[in-house]
Image (spheres, grey):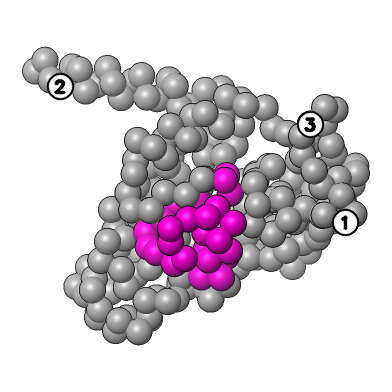
């Protein structure tokens, strides 16, 4: 009973620390694969992260394990390229590895490193957003406003523009895996990114624009990022 009380108190403390009111949204990208036997614990961890206020947790399915006998039904080849670019920039010991989480475009965690990922999220959420990023949607349409903040260290310019991305996100996708390393398993994937689009490049000046053609049946994540795969300056999640 004493152990149960201690664990309950610890969970209340974690909730208080990691779910503050008006916390800065933090982006977590999980590079995962249905063909990877090490990935289900990370997929489950993503479910936990997705339930935290102020965390935008995205499932980015890669295709480089498809040869093992089960082509990932959710994979996009561009996510393999994105992960490789992250690891090159972050000088990671890896080029491609699953599972791997990238937090705010600036820290990588291979395997399932819950305490380190949560600590990284907590440190970022205490900081103010370095830019003004507002996003609204109306069905298939998206309105975005961006502006610099005074004294911000963000460097987006005409010669070194930042990238504004939009991801179409499916909240829950159950998959019955029939072959490969996870054969016979039924896995529930959350916040699966089914499309990834660069909307525009931003030069750091006040700007607003509208975009159309999004699937009104899925959610959207809007990400402002240094160059292509640099530090994330802002992220918003829209139902």
Where is residue 81? Give x, y as percent: 56, 70
**Count of numbered marks:** 3
49, 225: nearer the viewer:
225
Q: How far apart in space, not on screen, are marks 1 and 3 (Cα)?
A: 18 Å
Which residue is drawn at the image coordinates 38% and 53% (left, top)? 110
User: Which residue lies under the disc numbered 2?
Assistant: 4
Q: In the image, is 216 to the left or to the right of 38?
A: right
- Give the SS element for disc 3: loop
Q: In the image, is 105 to the left or to the right of 198?
A: left
Q: How far apart in space, not on screen, are marks 2 and 3 (Cα)?
A: 45 Å
Which mark is nearer the camera, 2 or 3? Answer: 3
User: Which residue lies under the disc numbered 3?
Assistant: 152
In magenta stretch: residue 90: yes
Where is residue 126? Give x, y as percent: 57, 24
Tell me if label 1 and label 3 are in contact, CB under 8 Å: no
Q: In the image, is 123 to the left or to the right of 236?
A: left
Which residue is drawn at the image coordinates 30% and 81% (left, top)? 68
Magenta span of residues = 79-106
- Give the SS element for disc 1: loop
Which residue is drawn at the image coordinates 63% and 65% (left, top)? 196
Question: Which callout, 1 or 2, points at the residue further toward the start of the chain?
Answer: 2
Q: Against 184, is 1 above or below?
A: above
Q: Against 9, is 72 above or below?
A: below
Point out which mark residue 159 bears. Answer: 1
- Give the SS element for disc 2: helix
Which residue is drawn at the image coordinates 59% and 56% (left, top)? 89
Point out which mark residue 92 bears. Answer: none
Where is residue 90? Give x, y as percent: 55, 53
220, 153: nearer the viewer:
153
Tell me if label 1 and label 2 are in contact, CB under 8 Å: no
């Amino acid at each position: 009973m004493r152990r149960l009380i201690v664990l309950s108190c610890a969970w209340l403390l974690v909730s208080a620390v990691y779910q503050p009111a008006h916390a800065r949204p933090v982006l977590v990208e999980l590079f995962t694969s249905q063909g990877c036997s090490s990935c289900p614990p990370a997929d489950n961890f993503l479910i936990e992260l997705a339930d935290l206020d102020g965390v935008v947790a995205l499932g980015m399915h890669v295709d480089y394990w498809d040869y093992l006998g089960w082509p990932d039904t959710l994979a996009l080849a561009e996510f393999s390229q994105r992960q490789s670019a992250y690891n090159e920039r972050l000088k990671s010991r890896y080029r491609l590895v699953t599972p791997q989480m990238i937090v705010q475009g600036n820290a990588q965690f291979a395997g399932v490193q819950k305490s380190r990922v949560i600590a990284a999220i907590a440190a970022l959420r205490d900081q103010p957003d370095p830019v003004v990023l507002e996003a609204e949607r109306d069905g298939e349409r998206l309105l975005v406003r961006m502006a610099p903040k005074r004294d911000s260290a963000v460097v987006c310019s005409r010669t070194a523009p930042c990238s504004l991305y939009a991801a179409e996100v499916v909240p829950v996708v159950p998959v019955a895996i029939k072959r490969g390393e996870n054969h016979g398993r039924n896995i529930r994937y959350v916040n699966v990114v089914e499309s990834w689009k660069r909307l525009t490049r931003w030069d750091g000046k006040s700007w607003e624009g509208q975009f159309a053609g999004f699937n009104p049946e899925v959610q959207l994540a809007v990400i402002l990022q240094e160059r292509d795969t640099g530090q994330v300056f802002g992220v918003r999640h829209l139902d």
